[in-house]
């Protein structure tokens, strides 16, 4: 009995000895204040994913505590004493992890959820976001060796500029590379004082654009960030899977065999051809990029293009997500003509589509890529559309329920029940299909803002949802069979 009591006490003391700091509403501000960096988990005790994360988070906290300096990990219970803090930072799901720097929320944590991944990610985050270089030879070597653009702060007297620069470096460290200097020798040799400068990597130097860009705007983080986003990739940037989200739409990408290691000359040759044409359309709204065909073979397939062979391929994605592949063989002239026709509105978008059904009078309307606009974007109809995959088990289970829903509402003139095979047809923007089945409700006169259906998938729930969301009120018509039976019964009674 005594041994059992000792063991229980031992286990309890081990459980209580946690390296994860517990924060509450009353201790949150002081807990994150003056910490160079801190990872905070916002959790709920009943959350399954939180329970799964807990031991990994604890292990990471113990190991990161031993770093020099330590990297603290904390947690906040959103159901009890941390409710206000969770609300303040917009926590809507659990667990939510956020990185704080010097008392301020820096960014959402988007790294791994295992202990090794958390440790690696946080050690990288704790490293200086901007490398201080005060030796001229080291600075020149850094500029020569860069594979991506380097953003350099040259600081002599302007402390406000330096403060804003360091703040931006912390915030954008995952997107760009930063360095800074206060060396008088470097400032004099490179010719910059109290300026922020983007230096392009040597392999992207070209006669068609300057090799560096200097920020000349107001000393404010907002304007400096705007400058970086607009200029860091140059007129024709190198698009990769890692930086894809940095290229805004409309986006014109030229795909070819990009290889700066084995074929630097050929790679630069094609980029210069792109630059030559893009420079002629600077007054038009368009982002330009070049990319490796092998890295984007899946995306090329969505344009109806093949990554096989040596052809240089071109495709535009417009603001609304429509796809415009260039059909002609690439040359400076055909590329220029393609852009001219695009800006003039003379090119039809590519839509991946099955053939249009010969008949489409069933209770559930069949939608294909070519008829999406006609059926789903009909401003006179409320449309419930299911995006499915033929092999999806959940879709097969839903099919009889969805068909019955279509039959029930067949006589409701304002509502259309529809479905589309999302593996064989394009789902246009803003529809996002990341799993099957995915269901959206597209109300009349609001076709640009469809609503994702997240309710239960039984017949009653579908009808209840539609009654609540439909533009015009409706009643579910009785089945004709039932009406006929009532009529027969009335006639019999009269006899």
Image (cartoon, helix red, strand yellow):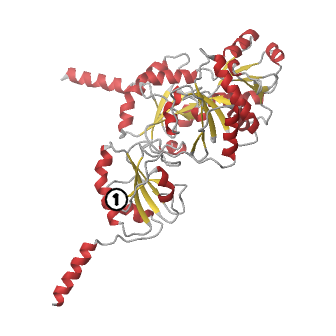
Disc 1 residue crowd, few under 14, some 14–19, many 20+, Cα 10 Å? few
Q: Is residue 186 left or right of residue 379?
A: right
Q: Is 272 placed above or below 305 here? A: above
Element type at marker 1? helix
> How far across and down, in percent of the image, does residue 171 sit?
62, 31
Q: Nearer the viewer, residue 492 or 335?
A: 335
> How far across and down, in percent of the image, does residue 258 sit?
59, 23
> How far across and down, in percent of the image, does residue 384 sit?
42, 58
Residue at label 1? 461
Residue 147 seen in the figure: no
Looking at the rendering, which quadrant does residue 135 occupy? Answer: top right
Q: Is 490 placed above or below 428 here? A: below
Q: Nearer the viewer, residue 489 or 17?
A: 489
Which corner quadrant holds the C terminus? bottom left
> How far across and down, in percent of the image, does residue 208 sit?
76, 27
Residue at position x 21%, y 20% in the image: 3
Which corner quadrant holds the N terminus? top left
Q: Is residue 301 left or right of residue 49?
A: right
Residue at position x 41%, y 26% in the image: 114
Q: Nearer the viewer, residue 441 or 424?
A: 424
Q: Is residue 469 left or right of residue 478?
A: right
Q: Is 301 placed above or below 420 here? A: above
Looking at the rendering, which quadrant does residue 145 occupy? Answer: top right
Looking at the rendered structure, the number of numbered marks drawn on it comes to: 1
Residue at position x 56%, y 18% in the image: 69
Furthest-bottom residue in view? 495
Residue 43 seen in the figure: yes
């Amino acid at each position: 009995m005594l041994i059992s009591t000792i063991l229980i006490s031992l286990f309890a003391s081990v459980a209580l000895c946690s390296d994860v700091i517990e924060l509450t509403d009353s201790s949150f501000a002081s807990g994150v204040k003056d910490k160079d960096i801190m990872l905070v988990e916002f959790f709920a005790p009943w959350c399954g994913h939180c329970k799964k994360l807990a031991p990994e988070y604890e292990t990471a906290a113990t190991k990161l505590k031993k770093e020099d300096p330590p990297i603290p990990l904390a947690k906040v219970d959103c159901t009890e004493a941390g409710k206000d803090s969770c609300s303040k930072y917009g926590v809507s799901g659990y667990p939510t992890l956020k990185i704080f720097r010097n008392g301020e929320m820096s960014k959402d944590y988007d790294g791994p959820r295992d202990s090794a991944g958390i440790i690696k990610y946080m050690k990288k985050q704790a490293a200086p976001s901007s490398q201080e270089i005060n030796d001229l030879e080291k600075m020149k070597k850094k500029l020569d060796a860069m594979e991506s653009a380097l953003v350099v702060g040259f600081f002599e007297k302007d402390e406000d500029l330096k403060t804003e620069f360091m703040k931006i470096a912390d915030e954008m460290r995952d997107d760009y590379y930063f360095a800074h200097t206060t060396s008088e020798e470097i400032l004099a040799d490179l010719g910059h004082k109290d300026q922020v400068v983007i230096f392009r990597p040597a392999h992207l130097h070209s006669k068609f654009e300057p090799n560096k860009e200097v920020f000349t705007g107001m000393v404010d983080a907002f304007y400096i960030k705007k400058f970086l986003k607009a200029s860091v990739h140059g007129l024709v940037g190198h698009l990769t899977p890692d930086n894809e989200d940095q290229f805004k739409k409309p986006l014109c990408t030229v795909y070819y065999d990009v290889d700066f290691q084995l074929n630097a000359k050929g790679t630069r040759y094609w980029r210069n051809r792109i630059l030559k044409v893009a420079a002629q359309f600077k007054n038009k709204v368009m982002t330009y990029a070049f990319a490796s065909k092998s890295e984007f073979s899946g995306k090329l397939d969505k344009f109806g293009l093949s990554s096989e062979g040596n052809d240089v391929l071109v495709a535009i994605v417009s603001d609304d997500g429509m796809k415009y592949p260039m059909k002609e063989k690439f040359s400076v002239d055909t590329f220029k003509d393609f852009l001219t026709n695009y800006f003039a509105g003379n090119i039809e978008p590519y839509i991946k589509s099955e053939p249009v059904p010969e008949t489409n009078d069933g209770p559930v309307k069949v939608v294909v890529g070519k008829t999406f606009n006609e059926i789903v974007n009909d401003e006179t109809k409320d449309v419930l559309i299911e995006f499915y995959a033929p092999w999806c088990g959940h879709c097969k289970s839903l099919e009889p329920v969805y068909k019955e829903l279509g039959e029930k509402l067949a006589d409701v003139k304002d509502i259309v029940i529809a479905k589309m095979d999302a593996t064989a047809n394009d789902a246009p923007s803003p529809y996002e299909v990341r799993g099957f089945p995915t269901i959206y409700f597209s109300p009349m006169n609001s076709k640009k803002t469809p609503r994702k259906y997240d309710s239960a998938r039984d017949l009653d729930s579908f009808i209840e949802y539609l009654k609540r969301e439909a533009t015009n009120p409706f009643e579910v018509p009785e089945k004709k069979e039932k009406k006929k039976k009532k009529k027969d019964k009335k006639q019999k009674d009269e006899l």
